[in-house]
Amino acid sequence: MKKIIVIISLLFLLITPIYAMSVSDLVVEKINNEDGFKYAYDPYWSQYETIELGNLDNDPEEEIVVSFGASYRNDEEDNIDITMHFWQIYDLVDGKYKLIKTTWANQYPGGLILKDLNGDQRKEILIFSHGGAHYTNIYLYQWQNKEYKKIWEDGSGCGVEVLFNDAIPKIWIGIPNWKKPGWCYAAEPLWAVYEWNGGTFVYNEENSDAGIEKEYIAYWIEQ
Ligand SMILES: [Ca+2]
Ligand SMILES: [Ca+2]
C-alpha cells in the first residue's frame, strides 16, 4: 500500500511540477536593482505574491511570471526595510526555467493578470502595484521584437478597475472631482474609461464621466 501511495505521489509531482512551485523557490536570492540597492525576497509580503503561467512569446511553451515583494535594510538612515514590488519572467530553456527579466513597479506588491488582449495567442502582462494608502499604479507589457515592452501605464489615488472579459477590454481610472466641495479620497470620483483598440488602451470620452479630460489636464497644469 505504501508503495502505491509513493508512486501516486511521485506521479502527482511529475504532472504538476510548476503548480507545486512557490514564488520563493523561483526568485533569485539577491536582486541587484538599478537604484543601486540589493533587494532580497521578503516573505512578509507573501499574501500579495502571485505566480502565473501563460504563453507570452514566440515559443509554444508557457512562461512563468512571478510577482512579489523584495526589501533591503536602509542602514544609513532610519534602519528600516525598504520594500518594492518586483516581478520576473522565467522562460523554458533546454528543459529548465531560466530567469530572463526582472522589473520593479511602484511600490508595494499588488497583482498580476495574464490575458491575451489582441488575440495573437500570446498573453499580455498586466501589473498592479500600490503606493501609500491609496495610490494604484497599473502597467501593461507585451512581447514585441524579442523583448517585453511596456505599452501602457497609468495610475490613480481614486481607484483603478479592470474588465478584461468583456468583448472590448476596459480599464477605469478614477479622477478626483475637484469641482465638488470638500472632495476627499472616500468621495466618488469621476471615471475615465480606457478601451482596448487592438494595440493599446485609449481614452474613450463618450463612455467616461463628462468633462474629465479637460478638468484633469487643467488641474495638473495649475500645479
Ligand atoms: Ca512561450
Ligand atoms: Ca497577445
Image (tube, grey):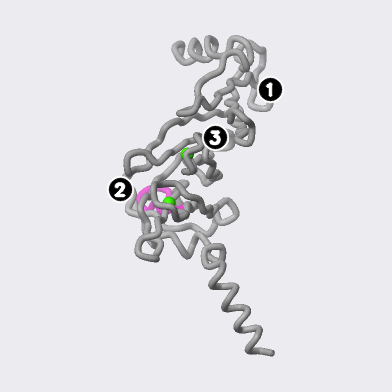
Question: Which residue is located at x 67 percent, y 12 percent?
Answer: 181
Q: Where's residue 190, x and y in %? A: 63, 19
Q: Residue at x 42, y 32 (%)?
A: 151
Give whichever of 94, 158 is nearer the camera. 94
Camera-nearest residue between 197 and 47: 197
Q: Is residue 56 left or right of residue 191?
A: left
Q: Nearer the viewer, mark 2 or mark 3?
A: 3
How far apart in space, not on screen, are marks 1 and 2 (Cα)?
Answer: 40 Å
Percent position of residue 64, x then y: 47, 55
Residue picked out by circle 2: 36
Q: Report whether residue 57 is seen.
A: yes
Q: Which residues are magenta?
A: 70-78
Residue position for label 3: 136
The amino acid type of the residue labelled 1 equals: Glu
Residue highlighted by disc 1: 188
Q: Is residue 194 above or below residue 219?
A: below
- Residue at image x 45%, y 62%? 26
The image position of residue 106, as x and y in percent, is 46, 39
Decide which of 60, 212 is in the foreground and name it.
60
Label 3, secondary structure: give it: strand
Sequence-first disc among 1 and 2: 2
Q: Do the residues under discs 1 and 2 have CB atoms within 8 angstroms?
A: no
